[in-house]
Each structure stands twice: as structure tokens, then as C-alpha cells.
Amino acid sequence: MNEFFAVVDEGDNVIGKATRKECHSNRNLIHRSVYVFVVNNNKVFLQKRSMSKDLYPGFFTASATGHVDYGEDYDEAAKRELKEELGIDAPLLRLGKVKSFTENEREISMLYVCRFGGRIRFNQREIVDGGFFSIDEIEKSLRKGEKKFADGFRIAFTEFLKLTQMHK
């Protein structure tokens, strides 16, 4: 079964749909994604992506991430990804959008924060590892290249810091 994503213009207006493969192989197709940052005690949960992922296998990224399916809105996608990847059903705060145009993808991404102190049960088909990190630890890792991060994460994390004012 093919997974379809909404194709959008630079203003984030839906102009069509395309398969995952089409979106990832055609740089002209802009599609939507979500980044959810789970925060507890001023630390952010980062996931290490499964080695079976088609993009960025084994790389670190936000707590829960994913594409917005055709016919789905950002909020629905964020809730779905949070539940699927981390087993969390909790309120989300929408922060804002960011354009994430990288070597591999052209996305318009909606950022969310989820304040959560409960148990995280990550889906081992999606995520191989994860943990809570301070903002300083994440910034240091990004600077020094200590961990491999998905390209879109760098853009989303920078915007997340601006929107939440969690950095120093």
C-alpha cells in the first residue's frame, strides 16, 4: 500500500499529493512534516532512528517526527507520531512552522512541544535508542559532531530554541 503525502507550495497550500518515494526522489515536491519535542525538567527527549529507516538511519532527531499524510492536518499527524513512536497520548502545544529544505527533502514542518513526565515506551521498529538531554548537551553535540543528527533536525531545533526561549 502506497503512503501519500500532501504536496504543498512554498506558502503551505495543498496543491496535490504524491507517494513517499516520489517526495523523496523529486526535489520539486514540497511536503509537510511534524517535529514534536518532548520536554521534562528542561531536558529534551531525542530519539535515535532505526537502522531500517530510508532516510537518516541511526541518526538522532526530535522526540517524534514524521510526515503529514494526505488528508491529515499537522495536529493529527503530530498526535499520531507521538503515540506511534513513543506511546504518549498527551497535550501538545503548537509552536510554529519552519521551512526545512535540505539535501534530501523539501519540507514545511510544524513544531510542537509536549511537556511529559511519564514513562516513554518507544516503538523499537522506529527507534533504537533515546534519552533526555539538556539544551547545552544537544548544542555541544551539534557543534562538535559527537552524534549524527538528521539534517532537518538541525533546522527544527534551532527554531524550537527561538520559539521556546529554552536556551541560555
Image (tube, helix red, strand yellow):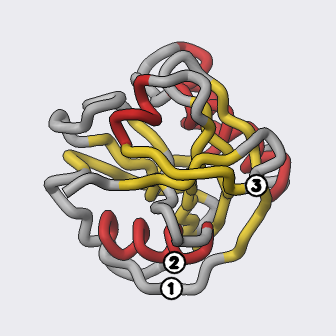
Which callout, 3 or 2, points at the residue further toward the start of the chain? Answer: 3
Q: Quadrant of the C terminus?
A: top right
Residue drawn at x 56%, y 56% is 34
Task: Please tell me how crowded label 1 is: few (under 14), some (14-19), or many (20+) other residues with Cα within 10 Å.
Answer: few
Q: Quadrant of the N terminus?
A: bottom left
Find residue 154 and report its horizontal and vertical position in percent: 61, 31
Q: Nearer the viewer, residue 158 or 140?
A: 158
Q: Nearer the viewer, residue 81 or 74?
A: 74
Inspect this view and state whether residue 58 appears. no
Task: Please tell me how crowded label 2 is: few (under 14), some (14-19), or many (20+) other residues with Cα within 10 Å.
Answer: some
The residue under label 1 is 90
The residue under label 3 is 13
Q: CA distance from mark 3 to mark 1?
A: 28 Å
Q: CA distance from mark 3 to mark 2?
A: 32 Å
Q: CA distance from mark 2 to mark 1?
A: 7 Å
Find residue 148 and report its horizontal and vertical position in percent: 40, 23
> Mark 2 and 1 residues: CB-CB less than 8 Å, in contact?
yes
Task: Answer with left or right where residue 168 lies relative to residue 147.
Answer: right
In the structure shown, which secondary structural element does the residue marked by tag 2 occupy? loop
Residue extending farthest front: 16
Which callout, 2 or 1, points at the residue further toward the start of the chain? Answer: 1
**Which quadrant holds residue 142?**
top right
User: Which numbered dot is residue 116?
Assistant: 2
Q: In this rendering, is residue 7 above or below 53?
A: below
Find residue 115 and report its horizontal and vertical position in percent: 59, 75
